[in-house]
Image: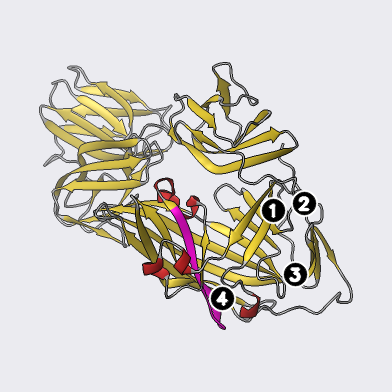
Amino acid sequence: MKKILTLCLISVFGSAGAQIIITSADMPVVNDTLRYSTTSASVNVNQTGADYIWDFSKLIVEHQEIQHHYSPLQTPYILQFGFTATYGIAENNFALGAMGGVASDVFGFYKNSAAASVMIGRGATIQSLPLGITYAPRDTIFKFPLSYLKSYSGSFSGEASLLGLGSLKQTGTRTTNVDGWGSITTPFGVFQCIRVKSVIVETDSVVFNGFGFPVPNNRTEYKWLAKNQHFPILEVIVNDLTSVQTVRYRDRYRPEAYINNANFTASKTIAQRSDTVNLNNQSYGTPTNFNWTITPGTFRFVGGTNTASASPRIMFDNVGTYSVKLKVNYEGGMDDTLKTNYIMVAEAPKALFGASTQFSKRNEIVYMIDSSLGAPTSWTWTITPTTFEYVAGTSNRSKNPLIVFSAFGNYNVQLQIIGPLGSSTLLKPDFILVWPTGLQNSSQNNVWVKVYPNPGNQFLKIEFQDHAPASIQLHNLLGQLVMSCESGNSPEKELDITLVPKGIYIIKIVQNNQIFTDRLLID
């Protein structure tokens, strides 16, 4: 069970020390190294303020790593950042979002000045070639001087070409405020500090021929900064989608924390519920035992394996993203590796859609409503004939576009979706009908059929001038079929609608190749 560490906050009457001001002199410089420890404990980040005492002394180290601040001339990205960045930091591939799985040597590049510390871009090697994502505008991490209650915000955007295959794009906003000051205690020591909170709303996109696959990467960062330390004393990053925390703190060398020994891969990281996924131990050396933790817990071990197997096999019960952690024990030590949101389980894609109305006036706004399955990441709408336009900033790539039709007639609507497990297309012929007086019956006159009462609540009566067989259908406003029947050769037909929920419906009657449609209110 994940251990929850409660943040102890004590409001002190009488200041334990004056609040501090962070300047560019307190930032890292080239060749600085930071040893930091990570923990799976969660901390309470919701309480803060003036002259607070944060007590994190009971944090337990589970892993240690070293962060180097390289000269840009020591990285593969000299041409892109060699003469503009102050230093570069090696990053996890997850920093690249959608393209992280095919990249290597990922670096973030920063430039410090007296006014600010800004991220100017990222470098990544894809297909053996070093690429640079240069931000314009840049991502302002800190704006100096930093003191209690200071706030600022800005946007950032960058794009890199993928060698004729498309491009990788990152865009977002950062909103920052200094929401606390006081004293912080960690296993590393006690420091006077300020706390800086940043809310990042980011979208990472892989673009092919102008067609993007957007992936949200929203998060909130909390950093406790102290004078002359160059690095945060404590850093907590909260994934806004999953609420999972990444907690690390500056620390000294601790021999009990093994570094980069535990490791694993999965046979597939995008799967369906019917798939079996093999987790393959790739740990360094010879572990004495294994312990796998997968969250959320909607999965099962199969093939005779279990949580203690070196390379277990698993099947997932629900769609969603799953984090996988492997903890290994050695003679005299242990290590673990957590891969957050490592496996995505999705349904096979199935395109589904409806509309706010199927019977529109000219120049009336119609809302297309996507209800597709399979976690689609892109949508392409095709409507014929082309006497219409997208409005309110939407387009044929929008999930739920807004459309205005400029000519009378019947319109075919097609939706193609693309998701993690492929694509799906749905075509609905004559889906939108545009008539001179808005929502009217589609016959030139209404002499061959009568439908009443309208509104109705128990029974609906239909009278035909012709005794020929007729097909009768009742649809909801999403285009889903609610009821259907045949009239036979009778001049009238009675429908029992007592079990149909209240709402607005469309009745469609076809007889002798004539089509009648009308709005029906059931109350």
In the image, residue 167 sits, relative to residue 347, either above or below, namely below
Q: Nearer the viewer, mark 2 or mark 4?
A: 2
In the image, residue 62 sits, relative to residue 474, either above or below, namely below
Q: Specify the segment rendered in magenta.
A: 105-118
Judged by its main secondary structure, the magenta piece is strand
Which amino acid, by three-letter code, is at mark 1? Ser
Dot 1: few (<14), some (14–19), or many (≥20) neighbours within 10 Å? many
Question: From mark 2 to mark 4, how far is it between C-alphas?
Answer: 31 Å
Q: Nearer the viewer, mark 3 or mark 2?
A: 2
Going 38% across and 39% down the picture, which residue do you hit? 420
Which amino acid, by three-letter code, is at mark 4? Tyr
- The residue beneath circle 4 is 152
- State the image quarter where residue 194 is shown: bottom right
Question: From mark 3 to mark 2, how far is it between C-alphas?
Answer: 22 Å
- The x, y position of residue 17, in whole percent, is 83, 77
The residue tagged with tag 2: helix, strand or loop?
Answer: loop
Upstream in sequence: badge 4 or badge 3: 3
In the image, residue 322 sits, relative to residue 110, either above or below, namely above
The residue tagged with tag 4: helix, strand or loop?
Answer: strand
Q: Are marks 1 and 2 in contact (CB under 8 Å)?
A: yes
Q: Which mark is residue 37?
A: 1
Q: Are marks 4 and 3 in contact (CB under 8 Å)?
A: no
Going 38% across and 68% down the picture, which residue do you hit? 80
